[in-house]
Image: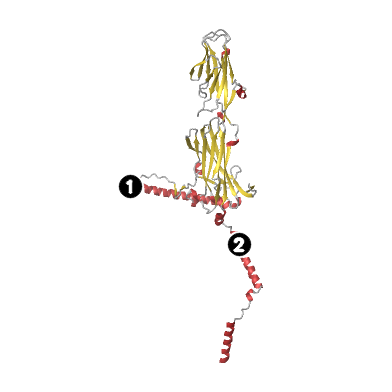
Amino acid sequence: MFVQVIYNYEPFYQEYRNQEEDGTYITQVGEKTTIDISFMVKNNAERAYEATLFIEYNANELDIPILNKKDSPVNIDDFKDNLVIISIGNPMEPNKQLKFELSFRIARGRTEGLGKPLEFRAFVNSTSDEKNLDDNSWKAIVRVIKRAELELSAISDPAIVRYGGEIKGESEMEFDIDIGPLVVHKYTVTNKGPWSVSNVTLQVDWPYQVASVFTTGKWALYLMETPTMQLTNTDNSKDIKQCTMVLSHERVNPLQLKFLLETENELYYEEDDNDNDDDDDDNDNDDDDDTRHENLEDEDLNRFKRTVEEYRREKRPSRELRIKSTKIREKSGEEVEIVKVNCADMTAKCFTVTCHFDFLDVDAAAVIDFRSRLWNATFVEDYYDIAYVEILSSGRLILDQEQGIEERNTQNNFASASTHAYPDRPAILETAPIPWWIIALAAILGLLILFILILIFWKCGFFKRNRPHHPTLYQAEYQFRREETSEA
């Protein structure tokens, strides 16, 4: 008896009929998620009774196969774990040749996509005696390349903010709103298929400080919360988890500012309220202790803030060391001067945030929010005289290569969220500090102008003019002289 197996026999699969040097088949699956194997079994001797074909396959990665008889009298008798038992004749006549096909559908699920090669074994047997068993078996190893298209996009909400107004130091701040306007960078990861993927990692470089020659720079985008990722599955279920980073306590709200919530009628801040109204009378002493403990914590926090601010004032770079501006031409044709703060150009101090996804199904999308505040004081002090500041965070997708997933387009695995910060010039002019040399120069210039005016008036005789004669004064003087004469 002779068995011949033609892997991917159909002409549609000719582009996938590749073999490596060790004989391993390479198959790429996309919209069509089946592996089709054509079998040809021939009896080269006498009648073969109870002729049976046994096929072993990876039951964890493949569903139960479907038989395409192609007018052959064959039937699937049974399935046992990873074994398919096919009856091919009882008896199978001499020189009889049978052709049929088995379609193995690649399983979809959270255990898929590990990139392990699939192994197929086939052997034919009967109750008749055979002298040559060498041509009764077949074996093939298939490495499946699964195709998926991942896409990363990013936006800033809002895209434009303004800085200006009062400059506050770190020790003066109590709430997050004291820092500056809210800036949220949103990253979206989408799997456009046709295959699901596992072990996807998003890395985002976050510009938390402006670049400086000193160890500690000025704040740029102050991260208020640990970034969270919300995954929406195809069944509308949602998975929410946090991203990770090194030294998170130094990266996320290190000043421990309170969150001020804005409503239509009032402002209030979040705080945990674990008090039980029923136990108020019993817990008065505990409340007093808690209050004293909170006061001590507040004092420690304020002391920490003052220490940090004093250190930053000592180490803070002067305005002459700010980021150099760049001239660009707007769409209107106007040439403006801007400053770029980003990680790629090393104009920002950055840290990396890592967001890991265990599984991304086809058409599933995950949104990662980075909630921050623009540090108003930094930009009012150093960048009030430019058109705007462009602040960028940048992200990239990393796919586990051991899965066997192939992407045809990897250009969309990178994205940046851009925030344009414009100076609020009227407010800045009211609060921006005026250099002392400008004040001194203005005073000297004013005195010089006054001296010149006095000199001009003196040359013109303004200070030597005669008093004009007045009739009343003249008569009084005449009367006075007559009285003196008469007395004499």
Q: Position of residue 292 (x, y in %)?
A: 40, 49
- At label 2, the amino acid type is Ala
Quadrant containing the N terminus is: top right
Mark earlier in primary sequence (1, 2): 1
Closest to the observer, 111 or 43? 43
Residue bearing mark 1: 281
Residue bearing mark 2: 442
In the rendered view, would you say 469 is above or below 276? below
Q: Residue furthest front?
A: 71
Q: From this viewpoint, is residue 148 visible?
A: yes
Q: How many marks?
A: 2
Name the secondary structure under disc 2: helix
Q: CA gap, disc 1 to disc 2? A: 67 Å
Q: From this viewpoint, is residue 19 visible?
A: no
Left/right of residue 188 with respect to residue 452 in the rendered view: left
Number of other residues with Cα within 10 Å of mark 2, as a class: few under 14, some 14 to 19, many 20 or more: few
- At label 1, the amino acid type is Asp
Q: In which quarter of the view is residue 16 placed?
A: top right
In the rendered view, would you say 167 is above or below 31? below
Q: Position of residue 318 (x, y in %)?
A: 58, 52
Quadrant containing the C terminus is: bottom right
Closest to the observer, 447 or 318? 447
Closest to the observer, 350 or 158? 158
Closest to the observer, 350 or 182? 182
**Disc ID at residue 417:** none
Marks 1,2: beta carbons within 8 A: no
Q: In which quarter of the view is residue 391 placed?
A: top right
Number of other residues with Cα within 10 Å of mark 1, as a class: few under 14, some 14 to 19, many 20 or more: few
Q: Residue at x 36, y 46 (%)?
A: 286
Name the secondary structure under disc 1: helix
Q: Position of residue 476 (x, y in %)?
A: 57, 85
Q: Position of residue 400 (x, y in %)?
A: 55, 31
